[in-house]
Amino acid sequence: MIPRLIARVALRSFSSSAPAYKHISHIGGKPITLPPNVSFSPSSSALTVSGPLGTTSVPLHPFVRIKFPVENILEVSVEDAEIKVQRQMWGTTRTHIFNAIVGMTEGFKVPLYLVGVGYRAQLEEDPRGTLDGGNGKRLTMKLGYSHSVHVPIPPHITCEVPLPTKIVVSCTDKHLLGLFAAKVRGYRKPEPYKGKGIFVGDEKIRIKSVKKK
């Protein structure tokens, strides 16, 4: 019994027929449908995307390949998907290009909600103007502190306050929009006991129960 088992393992170990695996990216392999009002200018290091809302550039690694197999279709590929770094950047690059297209045609928008007694926000002129790198306006928020919180609005961010407890921020760059929303949220992060704080989009938290002594 034992010699037969050893022989079977030996045959498997020295088999010359190894399984062939082909790595693909489920995200990177999806073609992108191009809007008619967007133009592209690819180079060896970047892809420039121009649309109604402006122009942006997506950095490209040397192993990334951009193809236009048919009209209004863009495909992203890499030289060797068996290499881990190329496989990782395949889907990431495709996502960055897609976000750039959406940003230059529609833009990105996210609401922020102020939840708490007395929490309020308003948009006003910044008395410091553009000295601190802002666009001349700032958010003034009452968040339960003894003082108001002032947040200068960067030039690339558009901000609206349709309600005292709702802030709508928009931008053509999804990454920069997320950074600014996170900055505003950081002044009063949602807490899990009373459910108060600044909530981004449809963010929800689980309320914890206070243990009684």
Image: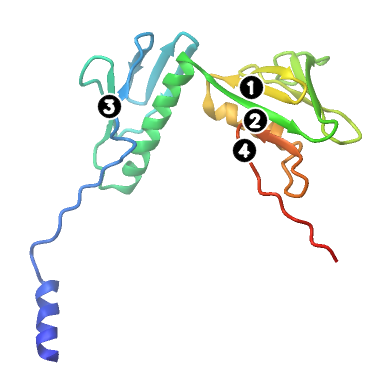
**Tag 3: amino acid:** Glu
Secondary structure at badge 4 equals loop
Crowding at dot 1, Cα within 10 Å, few <14 / some 14-19 / many 20+, comes out as many
Residue under pointer 3: 75
Local crowd size for mark 4, using a 10 Å CA cut-off: few (<14), some (14–19), many (≥20): few
- Residue drawn where x is 8% and y is 65% of the image: 16
Using the numbered discs, state the Cα–Cα distance from disc 2 to disc 1 in whole angstroms. Answer: 8 Å
Could you give the CA–CA distance between mark 3 and mark 4, rounded to whole angstroms?
33 Å
Checking the image for residue 181, the label placed there is 2
Q: CA distance from mark 4 to mark 1?
A: 15 Å
Instruction: Judge from the rendering whether residue 106 lies leftward or rightward of residue 135; answer left or right.
Output: left
Query: Residue 35, how many percent across, how many down?
Result: 36, 14
Label pair 2/1, CB-CB below 8 angstroms: yes
Direction from residue 16 to residue 144 in the image, left or right: right
Query: Is 30 on the left or on the right of 171, as rendered?
Result: left
Quadrant of residue 200 in the image? top right
Q: Residues within 10 Å of mark 3 (few under 14, many from 20)?
A: some
N-term mark: 4 or 2 = 2
| Residue bearing the label numbered 1 | 169
Between 86 and 139, the one nearer to me in the picture: 139
In this orientation, which residue lies closer to the viewer: 178 or 45? 178
Of the numbered discs 1 and 3, the one sitting upstream in the chain is 3
What residue lies at 19% left-to-right and 52% top-to-bottom?
21
Q: Which residue bears the numbered disc 4?
A: 203
Disc 3 + disc 4, Cβ < 8 Å: no
Amino acid of disc 2: Ala
